[in-house]
Image (cartoon, rainbow, N blue to C red):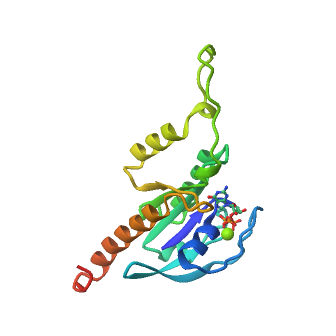
Amino acid sequence: MALVGYTNVGKSTIMNLLSKSEVYTENKLFATLDTTVRKVVVENLPFLLSDTVGFIRKFLDEVRESDILLHVVDISHPDFEAQMEVVNQTLAELGCADKKTIVVFNKTDAYTWEEKDPDDLTPPTKRNVSYEDLKKTWMAKMNENCIFISAKNRDNYQEFRDLLYKEIRDMHAIRYPYDNFLY
Ligand SMILES: Nc1nc2c(ncn2[C@@H]2O[C@H](COP(=O)(O)OP(=O)(O)OP(=O)(O)O)[C@@H](O)[C@H]2O)c(=O)[nH]1
Ligand SMILES: [Mg+2]
């Protein structure tokens, strides 16, 4: 499993949460310069998690070799949709477009929107989308292959781990069909 995403979205923060390790995080672009791999255990399932360099650089073997990608997105960034596009484009160039991918919408604590005044008749813009509406729209669009969390406040963290557990268990079942100790 690999954490991928635009720079500064919170990949290393999530790595630290899941693996209880101390990977360097900072509020600047390209804080991570090398891929780090850690063993993570969710319930009874061990797996390898790679924290990668903020996406832009190509030919990341860790990404290609991962069974599951966690595409981390910073929803508090005004251009997060364009950033997602860049990452998806890069994944496509790496030949990873069809890989199982879970989108982790991070920094829910920092998402802000401008409520429209009822007298304001100008058309609503994406700045006017409430958190609830944003969430609903993406949940529908992603077929529920996504989760909204705050790595900082640990909001929805248990649900995130539950989702990872389910995905890894399914992947184990495909990779090791005769290994039924889990079931
Ligand atoms: N408000 C808020 N800030 C967060 C959250 N998660 C991470 N951050 C902050 O975002 C900044 C970047 O976090 P990193 O984990 O270093 O991001 P990254 O994706 O690893 O960045 P690169 O290594 O540069 O690609 C740090 O200042 C974090 O503390 C969150 O859920 N909410
Ligand atoms: Mg990082």
Locate residue 120: give its quadrant.
top right
In x, y percent, where is residue 23?
Answer: 67, 77
- Give coordinates of residue 156: x percent, y percent: 49, 58
Work out whether 132 lies above or below 36. above
Percent across and percent down for residue 44 are: 37, 82
Q: Who's the residue at 60% across and 33% down the image?
A: 126
Q: Nearer the viewer, residue 170 or 110?
A: 110
- 86 vs 43, left or right, is right
Residue 37, compared with residue 52, is above or below; it is below
Q: Is residue 32 left or right of residue 3?
A: right
Q: Residue at x 61, y 66 (%)?
A: 11
Taking depth in this image into account, of 149 and 168 the one nearest to the observer is: 149
Q: Quadrant of residue 25?
A: bottom right
Q: Quadrant of residue 45?
A: bottom left
Asked whether residue 129 appears in the rendered view, the answer is yes
Q: Give the quadrant of ligand 2.
A: bottom right
Count of marks overlaid on the render:
0
Above or below residue 93? Residue 77 is above
Q: Closest to the observer: 69 or 61?
A: 69
Task: Point out residue 155 in the picture as x, y percentages from the top left corner.
Answer: 53, 58
| Residue 60 visible somewhere in the drawing | no
Between residue 152 and residue 36, name the one nearer to us.
152
Q: Residue furthest right?
A: 28
